[in-house]
Amino acid sequence: MYPSRFQYEAPTSLSEAIALLSAHDDAKVLAGGQSLIPMMKLRFAAPAVIVDINNIPKLDQHGVHADGSYRIGALVRHAALEKSTTLGEHQPLLASAAPLVADPIVRTRGTFVGSVCHADPQGDWASCMVALDGSILAQGPNGRRTIGVDEFVAGPFQTVLAPNEIAIQAIIPKPVGTRAGGYLKLERRVGDFATAGAAVGLQMDGDTVVQAGIGLTGVGARTINASEAAAALVGNRLDPDVIGTAAGLAAGVAQPRSDHRGSADYKRHVIETFVSRILTDAARTPEKVA
């Protein structure tokens, strides 16, 4: 099936892009296009105007900001993160997730920020953002605002972005301790959506957890913040009892449905197993990142 007719625009500045979005009621931003283009081909989406932001400079950069946060621009591809040594040095959770996103073809063009904006409950990066207490920097005609990821994702395939706003950066806050954690997901075959996945972000002071976050993929109508499970880790060493409690709490807040990928009970078991594995690995190697 072919997409509906649309007008194509390729602005060279953010101000021009925002003006185009403001001038058209039915416009969509194109960054990587790995979600938008298939939806257009199936006519699940039929925007009248496409605003391609790939010619806007400085949106393809990522790294440690002057304030200590880690920032990922709107045009940073999954593949760039997968190959980045900088990411591995500073963000072990994101580095562990990067090779698991979709398949090599999608990773070449798809973008980190675009994936978060797509708000797919089975999207990998949103769970990582939840685990790391990340936020999105958006720019519109009235300036910029920073939106926490829990607030940013309003529901399945829905965000709080205004029609004339552009998500220009993902922001991971400055760590208060040593970063650790990881991401695991179960998929039927390489490149498939997650049957279930778990992201665990830890900040350690020696062998004690000083801050934690846990995000769950594919086991609810939206990315799930397992905040109670994360709270059970804070102030504790990662011993078997603490790990077991947190993993059980994480599985308890999962809201999976039984389908051709497995029963709801099976998916909860996967979540419990994944959280336990990530925490057990972190307990063995508590100083992955300075």
Image (cartoon, rainbow, N blue to C red):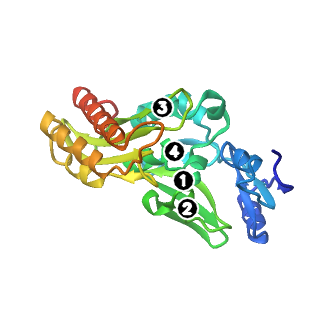
Disc 3 or disc 4, which is closer to the eye?
A: 3
Q: Amino acid at mark 4?
A: Gly
Q: Disc number at residue 159? A: 2
Residue 129 x %, y % = 44, 48
Residue 109 x %, y % = 67, 37
Cβ–Cβ under 8 Å for marks 3 and 4: no
Residue 106 x %, y % = 64, 34
In the rendered structure, the answer to whether residue 213 lies left or right of residue 108 reads: left
Q: Disc number at residue 119? A: 1
Question: Looking at the image, which residue is at 20% across and 46% down?
Answer: 233
Kindly state the secondary structure of the residue where label 4 is placed.
loop
Q: Residues within 10 Å of mark 2 (few under 14, many from 20)?
A: some
Cβ–Cβ under 8 Å for marks 4 and 2: no
- Residue most extreme to the bottom: 142
Q: Amino acid at mark 3?
A: Glu
Q: Disc number at residue 187? A: 3
User: Foreground residue, 217 or 233?
Assistant: 217
Q: Disc number at residue 202? A: none
User: Circle 4 is placed at which residue position?
Assistant: 123
User: Foreground residue, 196 or 229?
Assistant: 196
Q: Residues within 10 Å of mark 1 (few under 14, many from 20)?
A: many
